[in-house]
């Protein structure tokens, strides 16, 4: 092909240079993957130190060679980041990201399909549709559920929330808005529900008073007797209940609510049943835990997060809806400047009609490829091993005289350091464990987060990490106890 007529733009990279820089980057990344376990989980550098390393250069007036940019940026990121791919990273709910996901993101960026409209992303749309249907099959609901890939758990839940409201509100809500609804619309969730619900209440105009926080029982599950009574009271008082949210793995301790009981309450009051399974629902794939999730097939909508327990690199969440028409009823608009209509005999799937975004990236690719790389059985193995490692951690804490084990559900264990033979009150233990967590988080040997269980500040390990081994668990017990002693010595009175 004659290239002499091609436009020369400063941002293009010619073939040979692209190949050379690309190969070098892949070499650097391969070495990095190989050395993750020997690196600190985090360098513990302060924001000020990080700023100094980054420098304060002003906006460049002219360009820098790409090879130079990548060698500097590789150093910045590979040597000055928190590594959630480290085998001893158990903080919050952030997984060890798959390598296939890294390659997938590159390929997705090369094609750059706009997966808002079928005509702009014919193959990517088909792949996303297949991914959604595989995810439904994976967790054990009907593959007839439809849905959409979104950025994460918050967005997956918010997307479902609005669909629930459209489905259960009077028909006119889209035109007339909430202000013209005579009965206040209210919704229900357990006290253990993630903070996305606060955002939903504010964002969609209900206000936080419309949230009915249902207490949890001794197992941290939503108390369904109180749920049922609260709904009845609200109806008696002229409110309009429309939605109940069940947790399938709550954010703090991983508890799964009694989903079939919640489903039955929803049925009897004609309410939308949503499950927040952002973290825990992939465990439904494991035969011995399936019954824990009884009731999921009745959910009107489900949030799940491939970037949590399916180990996809961020970002990847998913909203599944039993009847996908509810998404279209909520989100579809047909502006004159879109020519996305389908022919009658082959209707187009235009994902802009399924959620908040119009222009959308190709998130599905990394999920779709990983599901094929290891299959359902590969995921059963990894998720089950994560749960077994969490149980091992919990049992090791139970056995250790200086640790108190508190909870263990799915792959989340909570426990705290309690000094041996040195009676201390609860306030002191809370302070001690908070300081201990801060030390551990800065120290770079292991990364945990925290939970508060029955008023006790504790350490929390969430294992969504296919790189973690038994040896890591044994080692972190020693690290935690060693640091616990140090902190206790430093602050005891
Ligand atoms: C149960 C649950 N729901 C929702 C979320 C929010 O997910 P994201 O941080 O991906 O928005 C989380 C995050 O940990 C979660 O655990």
Image: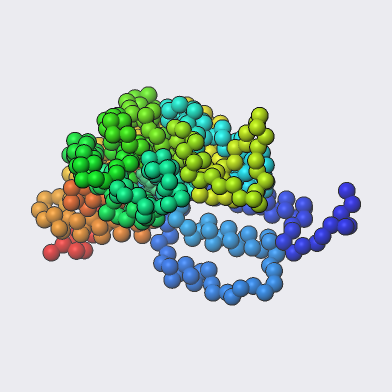
Q: Residue at x 28, y 34 (%)?
A: 269
**Toward the viewer: 17 or 156?**
156
Any part of residue 287 in sight: yes
Residue 244 position by quadrant: top left
The C terminus is located in which quarter? bottom left
Q: Is residue 362 visible?
A: no
Whole-percent x and y of residue 22? 68, 51
Q: Is residue 446 left or right of residue 127?
A: left
Q: Residue at the location (45% across, 36% down)? A: 321
Q: Which one is in front, 209 or 60?
A: 209
Q: Position of residue 278 (x, y in %)?
A: 40, 42
**Which residue is found at the position 56% from the left and 32% from the top?**
130
Residue in the foreground of this view, choosing between 382 and 284: 284
Residue ID at (41%, 52%): 177
The x, y position of residue 447, in whole percent, is: 36, 52
Picture quadrant of residue 427: bottom left
């Amino acid at each position: 092909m004659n290239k002499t007529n091609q436009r020369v733009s400063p941002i293009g990279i010619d073939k040979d240079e692209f190949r050379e820089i690309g190969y070098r980057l892949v070499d650097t990344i391969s070495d990095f993957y190989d050395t993750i376990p020997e690196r600190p989980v985090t360098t513990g550098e302060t924001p000020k130190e990080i700023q100094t390393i980054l420098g304060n250069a002003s906006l460049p007036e002219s360009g820098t060679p790409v090879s130079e940019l990548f060698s500097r940026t590789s150093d910045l990121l590979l040597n000055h980041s928190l590594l959630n791919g480290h085998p001893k990273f158990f903080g919050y709910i952030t997984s060890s990201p798959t390598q296939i996901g890294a390659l997938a993101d590159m390929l997705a960026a090369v094609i750059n399909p706009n997966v808002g409209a079928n005509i702009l992303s014919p193959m990517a749309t088909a792949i996303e549709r297949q991914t959604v249907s595989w995810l439904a099959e994976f967790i054990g609901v009907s593959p007839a559920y439809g849905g959409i890939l979104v950025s994460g758990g918050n967005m997956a839940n918010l997307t479902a929330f609005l669909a629930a409201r459209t489905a259960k509100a009077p028909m006119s809500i889209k035109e007339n808005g909430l202000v013209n609804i005579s009965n206040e619309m209210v919704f229900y969730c357990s006290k253990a529900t993630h903070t996305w619900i606060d955002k939903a209440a504010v964002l969609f105009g209900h206000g936080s008073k419309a949230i009915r926080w249902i207490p949890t029982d001794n197992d941290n599950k939503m108390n369904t007797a109180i749920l049922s009574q609260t709904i009845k009271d609200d109806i008696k008082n002229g409110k309009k209940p429309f939605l109940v949210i069940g947790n399938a793995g709550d954010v703090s301790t991983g508890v799964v609510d009694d989903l079939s009981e919640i489903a039955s309450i929803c049925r009897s009051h004609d309410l939308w049943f949503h499950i927040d399974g952002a973290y825990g629902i992939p465990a439904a794939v494991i035969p011995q835990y399936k019954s824990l999730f009884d009731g999921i097939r009745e959910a009107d909508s489900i949030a799940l997060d491939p970037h949590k327990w399916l180990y996809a690199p961020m970002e990847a969440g998913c909203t599944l809806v039993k009847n996908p028409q509810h998404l279209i009823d909520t989100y579809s608009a047909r502006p004159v400047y879109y020519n996305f209509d389908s022919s009658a005999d082959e209707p187009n799937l235009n994902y802009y009609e399924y959620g908040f975004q119009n222009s959308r990236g190709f998130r599905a690719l990394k999920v779709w490829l990983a599901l094929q790389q290891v299959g359902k059985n590969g995921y059963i193995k990894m998720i089950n091993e994560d749960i077994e490692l969490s149980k091992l951690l919990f049992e090791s804490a139970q056995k250790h005289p200086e640790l108190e084990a508190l909870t263990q559900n799915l792959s989340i264990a909570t426990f705290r350091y309690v000094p041996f033979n040195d009676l201390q009150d609860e306030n002191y233990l809370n302070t001690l464990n908070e300081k201990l967590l801060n030390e551990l988080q800065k120290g770079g040997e292991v990364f945990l987060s925290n939970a508060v269980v029955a008023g006790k500040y504790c350490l929390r390990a969430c294992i969504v990490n296919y790189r973690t081994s038994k040896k890591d668990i044994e080692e972190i017990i020693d690290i935690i106890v060693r640091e616990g002693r140090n902190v206790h010595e430093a602050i005891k009175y």
